Amino acid sequence: MKALNKEDAEFRRANEILKAAASFSAAELDQPHTLVAFIDEHRGRFGGVEPRSAAC
């Protein structure tokens, strides 16, 4: 059950990240400084991105 709760939390976090990213248009992504600003703005909300282990 603990593993399922952890997986659920990961899915919820990923969903929130995707919702935030969806608000960005493709035209804005063409500008690197705009993308960096977007990442910096949301870094505190989502934290860092850790690589998934090979066991996952």
Image (spheres, rainbow, N blue to C red):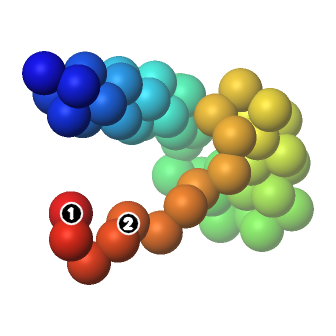
Residue 32 visible, this angle: yes
* Residue plotted at (49% across, 34% down): 17
Q: Quadrant of residue 55?
A: bottom left
Q: Position of residue 15 (x, y in %)?
A: 35, 28
- Residue at (71%, 26%) from the top-left corner? 45
Mark 2 touches mark 1? (CB < 8 Å): yes
Name the spot of residue 25 as percent of width and height, x first: 54, 41
The foreground one among 48 and 34 is: 48
Q: Quadrant of the C terminus?
A: bottom left
Amino acid at pointer 2:
Arg
Q: Is residue 12 left or right of residue 22?
A: left
Residue under numbered circle 2:
52
- Dot 2: element: loop
Q: Residue at x 76, y 41 (%)?
A: 43
The residue where tag 1 is placed is 56
> Please, what is the three-letter code of the amino acid marked with disc 1?
Cys
Identify the residue shown where x is 68% and y is 51%.
Answer: 48
Q: Going by the picture, which residue comes out furthest to the bottom?
A: 54
Q: Which mark is residue 39?
A: none
The location of residue 36, given as percent across then percent down, is 81, 58
**Mark 2, other Cα within 10 Å: few <14 / some 14–19 / many ≥20:** few
Quarter placement of the N terminus: top left
